[in-house]
Amino acid sequence: MAMISGPEGLGTRMRHVLEILDGDVARFLADIGLDGYRPRYSPVVRALLARGPLAIRDLAEEMRVTHSAASQTVAQMNRAGFVSLEPGADARQRIVSLTEKTRDLLPLIEAEWTATTEAAEALEAELPYSLRALLDAILEALERKPFRQRIGETGAARGLAGSDVR
């Protein structure tokens, strides 16, 4: 694995780490026979197992992602046969449920969750600080003051000619 150095920004580094982690989980999934199953499906499966069928809006809230992100993941999962979609109480609402295909794969999916959790804990043990605690602290700081606001408060942003960046 190449070390990241140079002018890459924080977002670039975070995306690179996520790409490495997701890529390795995806390769492991393929190795155990879950070829069409992607790492991003696990939060959906976990939420549906915990709460039962959900509207996409409620699923997004449960997963702590945007409605758009949940909708895109659900659409991919539906095409792959991992979830089904039924009309909800109102015409715009769609209810997401696990399919029999997914339920049949649950032993493999759960084994992957356990293995991935153990591997993440081992990785975190090698780090000089808790990655989970750091990510939680970042999220809390961004809830207190969004990054957009932080950018607008910089000297560089205030120095932009003719712009109103407040």
Image (tube, rainbow, N blue to C red):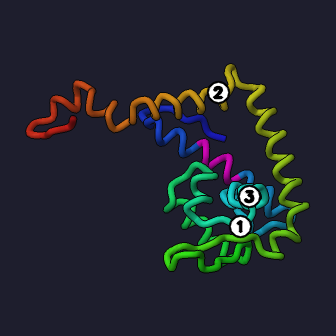
Q: How far is the residue under mark 2 from the one under mark 1?
A: 31 Å
Quarter occupied by residue 144: top left
Disc 1 and disc 3 in contact, CB within 8 angstroms:
no
Mark closer to the observer (3, 2): 3
Q: What stretch is highlighted in magenta?
A: 17-23
Q: In the visual, does 129 lie left or right of 165?
A: right
Q: In which quarter of the image is the C terminus?
A: top left
Circle 3 residues within 10 Å: few <14, some 14–19, many ≥20: few
Residue 72 % position (x, y): 55, 67
Q: Does the magenta stretch include residue 39?
A: no
Tag 2: amino acid? Ala
Instruction: Please name the residue that numbered disc 1 is placed on.
Output: 53
Residue 67 % position (x, y): 51, 60
Quarter occupied by residue 60: bottom right
Residue 107 % position (x, y): 91, 61
Which residue of the protein is positioned furthest toward the front in this rendering?
A: 89
Tag 1: amino acid? Pro
Magenta highlight: main SS: helix
Instruction: Please name the residue that numbered disc 3 is placed on.
Output: 51
Q: Earlier in the sequence, mark 2 or mark 1?
A: 1
Instruction: Please name the residue that numbered disc 2 is placed on.
Output: 133
**In the image, residue 45 above or below residue 133:** below
Quarter occupied by residue 101: bottom right
Q: In the visual, does 106 lie left or right of 7?
A: right
Circle 2 residues within 10 Å: few <14, some 14–19, many ≥20: few
**In the image, residue 155 above or below residue 108:** above
